[in-house]
Image (tube, grey):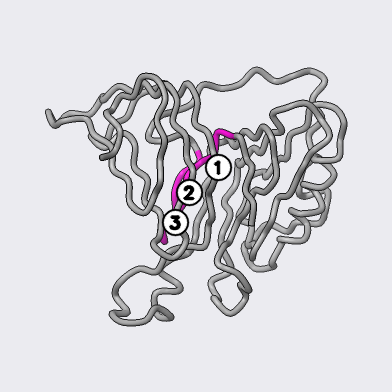
């Protein structure tokens, strides 16, 4: 598959859940709302909160409407819990860049591995200009599928999120963790062709430890200033 998302994208690659309220350990500044922007709410396309019904098709319908809109567009996932299976958000899109995805609620993966024909859960493909933002949660429900993993059942198995060809540009903020940049990609679905350009984070934690980066199963290219220092 080709992944052409030139984007700021929340990394949610672990079996556990992750918060979509920051980028790489920082809190991203709020973006000013474009008065001409049209909001595409997944509820208007049939998505059902409650975490019991698979709303993947409704998410895809809402995405297609937003992607085909020729003006500024925002896909909105409102408050509530939404269960979704394998979902592809596919471009190219017709409007000006970036197209925005705002996550206010919680996304939960369908926990049955047999429901996934390929090794991904959420995929952004062929999109030039993407911004994923919000204060919601993306939950791969890793603990629910550990029983399906081979070997030690106590070990987590990775969620099926594929991230490739993504650019993180001019990221600023603070981190309460001494690990400011933490890329934990799975061995089965590694991160590929990630580009970090001008990352400037500040450590605001209590413990006096070196500010660092960690990268597992991720191929990262660096441009410009990098703080914390890049993974080695």
Q: Are marks 3 and 2 in contact (CB under 8 Å)?
A: yes
Instruction: Where is residue 144? Give x, y as percent.
Output: 45, 72
Q: Are marks 1 and 3 in contact (CB under 8 Å)?
A: no
Total labels drawn? 3
Q: Are marks 1 and 2 in contact (CB under 8 Å)?
A: yes
Name the residue beneath numbered marker 2: 192
3D distance between C-alphas at marks 1 and 3:
12 Å
Quadrant location of the N terminus? bottom right
Question: Is residue 129 highlighted in magenta?
Answer: no
Name the residue beneath numbered marker 3: 190
3D distance between C-alphas at marks 3 and 2:
6 Å
Q: Is residue 174 left or right of residue 94?
A: left
Mark 3, Cα crowd under 10 Å, few <14 / some 14-19 / many 20+, is some
Name the residue beneath numbered marker 1: 165
Magenta stretch, main secondary structure class:
loop
Q: Which residues are magenta?
A: 7-20
Quadrant location of the C terminus? top left
Taking depth in this image into account, of 204 and 68 the one nearest to the observer is 68
| Among numbered discs 1 and 3, the one appearing first in the sequence | 1
| Among numbered discs 1 and 2, the one appearing first in the sequence | 1
Question: Is residue 17 highlighted in magenta?
Answer: yes
Instruction: Where is residue 157? Give x, y as percent.
Output: 39, 69
Instruction: Where is residue 46? Give x, y as percent.
Output: 81, 56
In this rendering, is residue 82 above or below 209?
Answer: below
């Amino acid at each position: 598959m080709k992944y052409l998302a030139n984007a700021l994208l929340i990394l949610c690659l672990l079996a556990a859940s992750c918060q979509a309220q920051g980028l790489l350990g920082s809190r991203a500044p709020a973006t000013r709302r474009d008065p001409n922007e049209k909001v595409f709410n997944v509820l208007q396309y049939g998505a059902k909160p409650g975490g019991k019904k698979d709303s993947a098709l409704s998410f895809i319908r809402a995405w297609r409407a937003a992607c085909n809109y020729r003006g500024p567009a925002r896909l909105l996932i409102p408050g509530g819990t939404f269960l979704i299976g394998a979902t592809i958000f596919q471009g190219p899109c017709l409007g000006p860049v970036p197209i925005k995805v705002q996550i206010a609620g919680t996304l939960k993966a369908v926990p049955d591995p047999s429901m996934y024909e390929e090794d991904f859960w959420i995929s952004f493909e062929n999109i030039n200009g993407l911004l994923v933002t919000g204060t919601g949660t993306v939950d791969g429900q890793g603990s629910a599928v550990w029983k399906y993993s081979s070997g030690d059942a106590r070990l987590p198995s990775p969620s099926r999120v594929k991230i490739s060809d993504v650019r993180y540009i001019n990221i600023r903020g603070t981190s309460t963790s001494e690990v400011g940049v933490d890329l934990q990609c799975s061995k089965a679905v590694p991160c590929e062709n990630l580009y970090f350009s001008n990352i400037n984070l500040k450590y605001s934690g209590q413990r006096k430890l070196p500010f660092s980066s960690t990268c597992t199963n991720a191929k990262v290219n660096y441009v410009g200033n990098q703080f914390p220092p890049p993974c080695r």
